[in-house]
Image: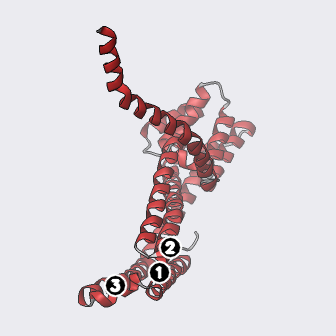
């Protein structure tokens, strides 16, 4: 009787055991695929991984985002095939592959600009602390406590490396290599030179602070003078899509031909390409290097 009950219990558990075995098989099969795609992600973000990690995006999170990106691209291609929108599906999939890297580059650029702008106040604080009689490690610690992010994290990292036994010039050099920022490189080289060869560190820090403030002043002036032109560029870029939406309301059957026919899709893709090229051209004209 007990054996019969045990056999019935095992029979009831058979579907669950089958599902568990199937799940394990899928995991074992997918794991190499994930490892392969992680390597592809490293190639996709080649030259950006260290900078992205400094912005707070960890490598594991980037791997997860890349898998969702692949899923979105696959769904776009499948949807385009099912709806007979092959050309549009190809363009959208291509944009999905290109746009994330562009957005990540923009995130890195914004963080670098913020670091450069905050470095001016940090240099002034270091100079004031040095005049007050503090050593450079003490001055770095004091300035790091009062500084905003992200310069605060970078200064704290230098202090932690120094307290961990790393020589101060080497800790500053590591930060310079990690950030890959011209202004911070000048700041690091100046500090290392003063530490190794001697010199008036306060005068050097004041000069760096004045130079950064002057660059900020010129950039603000350029942004104010080109603000109207940049707004015009975006209005002209958005207008074709607004016009297409209005035509969809007024003449829906005719507008649908832009999406359901090969000729219409080619015209739509051509318009998108010209709009994108015009935006890039305008940005290259308006973005002047200081």
Q: Residue furthest top?
A: 2
Q: Residue furthest left?
A: 250
Residue, disc 3: 256
Q: Which mark is residue 272?
A: 1
Which sits in the foreground, 50 or 274? 274
In the image, residue 112 above or below residue 163: below
Give the SS element for disc 3. Answer: helix
> Which image quadrant: the N terminus?
top left
Residue 254 left/right relative to 229: left
Which sits in the foreground, 229 or 60? 60
Frontmost of labels 1 and 3 is 3
- The residue located at (45%, 36%) in the rendering is 23
Give the SS element for disc 2. Answer: helix
Q: Is the residue under label 2 in contact with that under label 3 (CB below 8 Å)? A: no
Answer with mark 1 or mark 2, whichever residue precedes in sequence.
Answer: 2
Marks 3/2: CA–CA distance: 18 Å
Q: Which mark is residue 91?
A: 2
Q: Is the residue under label 2 in contact with that under label 1 (CB below 8 Å)? A: yes
């Amino acid at each position: 009787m007990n054996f019969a009950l045990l056999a019935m219990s095992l029979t009831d558990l058979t579907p669950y055991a089958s599902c568990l075995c199937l799940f394990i098989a899928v995991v074992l099969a997918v794991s190499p695929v994930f490892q392969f795609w992680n390597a592809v992600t490293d190639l996709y973000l080649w030259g950006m991984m260290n900078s992205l990690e400094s912005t707070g995006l960890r490598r594991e999170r980037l791997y997860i985002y890349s898998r969702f990106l692949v899923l979105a691209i696959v769904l776009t291609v499948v949807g385009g095939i099912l709806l007979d929108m092959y050309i549009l599906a190809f363009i959208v999939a291509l944009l999905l592959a290109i746009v994330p890297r562009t957005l990540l580059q923009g995130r890195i650029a914004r963080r670098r600009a913020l670091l450069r702008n905050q470095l001016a106040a940090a240099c002034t604080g270091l100079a004031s602390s040095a005049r007050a009689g503090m050593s450079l490690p003490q001055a770095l610690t004091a300035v790091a406590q009062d500084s905003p992010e992200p310069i605060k994290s970078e200064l704290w990292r230098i202090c932690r490396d120094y307290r961990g036994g790393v020589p101060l010039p080497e800790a500053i050099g590591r930060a310079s290599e990690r950030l890959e920022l011209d202004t911070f490189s000048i700041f690091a080289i100046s500090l290392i030179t003063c530490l190794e060869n001697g010199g008036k560190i306060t005068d050097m820090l004041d000069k760096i602070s004045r130079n950064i403030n002057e660059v900020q002043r010129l950039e603000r002036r350029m942004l104010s003078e080109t603000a109207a032109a940049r707004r015009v560029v975006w209005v002209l870029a958005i207008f074709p899509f607004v016009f297409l939406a209005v035509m969809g309301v007024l003449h829906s059957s005719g507008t649908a031909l832009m999406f359901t026919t090969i000729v219409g899709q080619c015209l739509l893709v051509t318009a998108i390409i010209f709009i994108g090229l015009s935006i890039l051209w305008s940005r290259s004209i308006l973005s002047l290097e200081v």
